[in-house]
C-alpha cells in the first residue's frame, strides 16, 4: 500500500461534509436533494425537515410536506431497520437489498413471540387487508391479523408484517409536527421487488460512496445493515479508487468523486437526531471523537448535535412553554468566543424556522461539562 494516498480524519470529514451538503447551503429541489443524500432518517416527523433546513438555501416546511403528500418521497422501514424518507426510485433500489436484514430483525425481535406462525401466510393476509389502497395503523392491522391467529399477540403480528413486507407509511404521517400511530399501506405501486439483484447491490454501493465516501466495506455495512458487501466491493474494485486511512484500512470511492482540501473551513451546523453523517460509518472518527460519541450515542438514541469546524462539538435541545421557545446548547468541548457567536447565530436562525410564531425565542449556551 506504499503508493496509496492516506486520508486522515479531517480529510475524510471534509469529504463527508461536501457530499452531505454541509459545507454550504445549496439551491436544490427537495427530491433531488434527498436523492443526493441517499435518504433522510425519519424516525420522528421533524428530523427530515431540520436536516434539509441545514443543507438547502431557502428551504420551507411546505416543500417537504408537498413531496410526502404527493408520494414523490416515501417513508418506510429501511436502513438499520429504522424509518427513512427516500424517493420512489431509491426506494426501489434500497428496499430489496434490506429484505434479508429486516427478516433477521424480525427473528431477533419477535421470533420468540411468533414461534409456529406461518410467516408467508401472515404476510399474504396482511396484503389482502391492505388491498385496494386500504390504510391501517400498526395496532389496527395487528388486531385484524389476530382474528386469524388469536394465539399470537396483535402487537407482535403488526411489527412482524412491518419487517416482512415493503410497506409505506403515507401522509399525513411523517409530516411536520404530525405524531401518532404508524399507518401502513402497500407499496406495490412503486414497483419495488422482493429481493435484490446483483446489479442492484452494485448500484447501492456506488450510491453509498457518492453520498458518504471514501469509506470502508465495514462503513457501508454499518450504514445499511446489508451482509455480503465485501464480495460486492471486490467485484467493483476495478472501477473504484482506493485510498487508505491512518490505520491502513482500505477506503473505496468513486473515481471522479470530489475530495475537498482538509483545511477548508466548515460552518456551524445544527443537525437533528439520527442525522446520517453520524451513523453512516463503522469508524465515526471523521465526525466525532470516541469520548464525544459516547455522550451523543447512548443506547439506540443519537442526540441532536452541533458541528463546529466539521466535527461534533455540542448537543442541542428545544423546550417550549407559554409561547416561548428556548434552544439550549450543551458544549462537549470548550468553544472559543468566535465559535460561541457562530453557534448562537445559527441556533437563533434554527429557532426562527422551527418556532416562527413563538412570542420569544432564546438561545442558551451552557458551559462545557
Image (tube, rainbow, N blue to C red):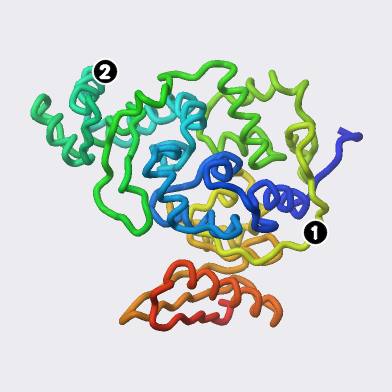
Q: Earlier in the sequence, mark 2 or mark 1?
A: 2
Per the image, label 1 sits on a secondary structure element best described as loop
CA distance separating discs 2 and 1: 53 Å
Report the mark closest to the observer, 2 or 1.
1
In screen coordinates, is 9 left or right of 148? right
Q: Which residue is mark 2?
A: 120
In screen coordinates, is 75 left or right of 304? left
Asked which quadrant contains residue 165, the reply is top left
Asked which quadrant contains residue 288, the reply is bottom right
Classed neighbour count for the residue bearing mark 1: other residues with Cα under 10 Å, few (<14), some (14–19), many (≥20)? few
Q: Which residue is mark 1?
A: 264
In screen coordinates, is 162 left or right of 74? left
Mark number, residue 366: none
| Picture coordinates of residue 350, whole percent (x, y) | 52, 69
| Picture coordinates of residue 319, whole percent (x, y) | 39, 74
| Residue drawn at 28 percent across, 33 percent down | 185
Amino acid at each position: 500500500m506504499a503508493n496509496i494516498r492516506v486520508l486522515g480524519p479531517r480529510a475524510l470529514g471534509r469529504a463527508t461534509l461536501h457530499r452531505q451538503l454541509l459545507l454550504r447551503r445549496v439551491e436544490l429541489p427537495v427530491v433531488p436533494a434527498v436523492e443526493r443524500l441517499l435518504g433522510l432518517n425519519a424516525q420522528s416527523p421533524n428530523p427530515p425537515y431540520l436536516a434539509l433546513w441545514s443543507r438547502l438555501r431557502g428551504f420551507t416546511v411546505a416543500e417537504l410536506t408537498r413531496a410526502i403528500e404527493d408520494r414523490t418521497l416515501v417513508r418506510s422501514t429501511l436502513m438499520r431497520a429504522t424509518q427513512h424518507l427516500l424517493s420512489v426510485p431509491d426506494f426501489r433500489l434500497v428496499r430489496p437489498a434490506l429484505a434479508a436484514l429486516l427478516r433477521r430483525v424480525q427473528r431477533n425481535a419477535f421470533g420468540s413471540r411468533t414461534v409456529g406462525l406461518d410467516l408467508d401466510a401472515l404476510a399474504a393476509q396482511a396484503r389482502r387487508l391492505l388491498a385496494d389502497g386500504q390504510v391501517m395503523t400498526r395496532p389496527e392491522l395487528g388486531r385484524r391479523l389476530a382474528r386469524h391467529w388469536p394465539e399470537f399477540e396483535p402487537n407482535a403480528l403488526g411489527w412482524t408484517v412491518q419487517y416482512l413486507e415493503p410497506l409505506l407509511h403515507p401522509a399525513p404521517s411523517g409530516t411536520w409536527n404530525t405524531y401518532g400511530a404508524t399507518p401502513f399501506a402497500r407499496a406495490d405501486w412503486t414497483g419495488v421487488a422482493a429481493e435484490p439483484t446483483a446489479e442492484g447491490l452494485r448500484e447501492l454501493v456506488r450510491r453509498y460512496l457518492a453520498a458518504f465516501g471514501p469509506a470502508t466495506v465495514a462503513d457501508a455495512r454499518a450504514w445499511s445493515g446489508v451482509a455480503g458487501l465485501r464480495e460486492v466491493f471486490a467485484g467493483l474494485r476495478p472501477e473504484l479508487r482506493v485510498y487508505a486511512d491512518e490505520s491502513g484500512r482500505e477506503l473505496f470511492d468513486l473515481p471522479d468523486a470530489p475530495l475537498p482540501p482538509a483545511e477548508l473551513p466548515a460552518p456551524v451546523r445544527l443537525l437533528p437526531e439520527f442525522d446520517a453523517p453520524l451513523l453512516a460509518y463503522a469508524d465515526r472518527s471523521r465526525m466525532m471523537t470516541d469520548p464525544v460519541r459516547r455522550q451523543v450515542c447512548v443506547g439506540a438514541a443519537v442526540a441532536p448535535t452541533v458541528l463546529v469546524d466539521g466535527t461534533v462539538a455540542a448537543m442541542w435541545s428545544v423546550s417550549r412553554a407559554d409561547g416561548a421557545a428556548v434552544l439550549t446548547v450543551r458544549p462537549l468541548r470548550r468553544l472559543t468566543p468566535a465559535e460561541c457567536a457562530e453557534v448562537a447565530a445559527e441556533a437563533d436562525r434554527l429557532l426562527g424556522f422551527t418556532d416562527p410564531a413563538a412570542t420569544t425565542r432564546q438561545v442558551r449556551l451552557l458551559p462545557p461539562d
